[in-house]
Amino acid sequence: MVAYFHNLGMPVPPATMQSLWDSLRGSGTITAGFGNEPGGRGQQVLRRYQAGDTIFAYANGFGVVGYGIAEGPQSYRLVANARRGSNHRHEARVSWQATAGDIHDALPPFAVRQITHHLPRQTSEKVSLRPERLREETERRWPNQPITRAHVLAAFQQVAKEGYRAERRSTRWDVLHPNSGDRYPPKVILSRAAQLAGVRNNRGGGWPTNDVLAALGFMIVPKEGEELEVEQDLAQMDLAGLRDRAEREARQEPPRTSSRGQSIARSPWISAYAKRTANGRCDLCGNDAPFRTAAGPFLECHHILRLADGGPDCIENVVALCPNCHRRMHLAPRKSDISALRQPVTLATNHRFGSKE
């Protein structure tokens, strides 16, 4: 395997670099620009990283801010919108292993030079001298959360090979394998990932588990059976009828179910109404859903005021977001985004951004 420096971009103000780094850490990605042309140099840079290569993130003016393991060329994509603090639209996935939460805590350039006798001057450069020593220093400097994306990916592989007990099947939620799209019980995957990381998983099922997996970039979706029941009735229901059913399902304090932890029940009818009124577009950025499934445009439901914070499960508090915006609202919410999502939806437009032709 090869080790690389990956420069996050040109020198920018600290607040801008911090915003970009927060986004990259939260999404498990690295980016490149070079004009953002399909097949251009940005794509070539990111696709050279093979699965298992070590990537040292370097912030100009600050130093090394973390390291991760590349997921390989197959994880590359050209996105429609650049991340905050950057104009880069070429992205590839990285499983961050040790990272600085604050860029001011970076391993400074003089320390990097002492270890490697080298500082990066281009977007991507090989670390030819003592990458192991550089990795050890980052791990010592920033002990990261024990369970990483790499542990979860390995857990998927083991569970697919070995299976799991029938009584451990999930009742309401599944986590999707990022490549195959196969469904697995979140608690099974996170428990196996914890074993691989050598730590104890004290989380029960439901959203304490789901939030950990979502923060690592994995998609949590409702069980197919529950959605199928709703979709069958939806085929015979107009929007006004769906709103009526969703309003009858509204609960100021949704019921909680307990195992070793607690999860909060969410009405599939309220979720269905939010997705119907979104009309195939994200309620936050206004872009089209990233892809379609048999059930229609793929959007994820989000509670503006989180259920865990006492928010109600009702149509006024539920919106439909694209996966990117959904992760952002959990990892880096902004007051302006929350205010925008609280704008009322009318049956005349069926959407905060107006009806879609």
Image: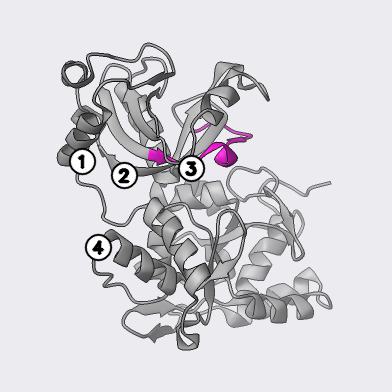
Q: Are marks 2 and 3 in contact (CB under 8 Å)?
A: no
Q: Amino acid at mark 3?
A: Glu
Q: Nearer the viewer, residue 56 or 235?
A: 56
Q: CA distance from mark 4 to mark 2?
A: 15 Å
**Label 2 vs 1, first from the N-terminus:** 2
Tell me: 70 left or right of 223. Answer: left
Q: Position of residue 275 (x, y in %)?
A: 67, 62
Q: Secondary structure at mark 3?
A: loop
Mark 1 to mark 4 CA distance (whole Å) = 16 Å
Distance (Cα) linking label 2 and label 1:
8 Å
Tell which of 97 and 22 is nearer to you.
Answer: 97
Q: Which mark is residue 198?
A: 4
Nearest the viewer among 182 and 287 is 182
Q: How many marks?
A: 4
Residue 74 magenta: yes
Q: Position of residue 71 (x, y in %)?
A: 48, 42
Disc 3 target residue: 71
Q: Residue at x 64, y 80 (%)?
A: 226
Contact, CB < 8 Å: mark 4 with mark 2? no
Q: Is residue 82 magenta?
A: yes
Q: Residue at x 24, y 64 (%)?
A: 199
Mark 3–mark 1 Cα distance, whole angstroms, equals 20 Å
| Crowding at mark 1 (Cα within 10 Å: few <14, some 14-19, many 20+) | some
Q: Amino acid at mark 2?
A: Gln
Q: Give the magenta-colored segment's residue range.
A: 69-83
Q: Are marks 2 and 1 in contact (CB under 8 Å)?
A: yes
Q: Which residue is mark 1?
A: 139
**Mark with earlier residue (3, 4):** 3
Mark 1 vs mark 4: which is more N-terminal? 1
Q: Is residue 262 above or below residue 280?
A: below
Q: Quadrant of residue 214?
A: bottom left
- To which residue does mark 2 refer? 97
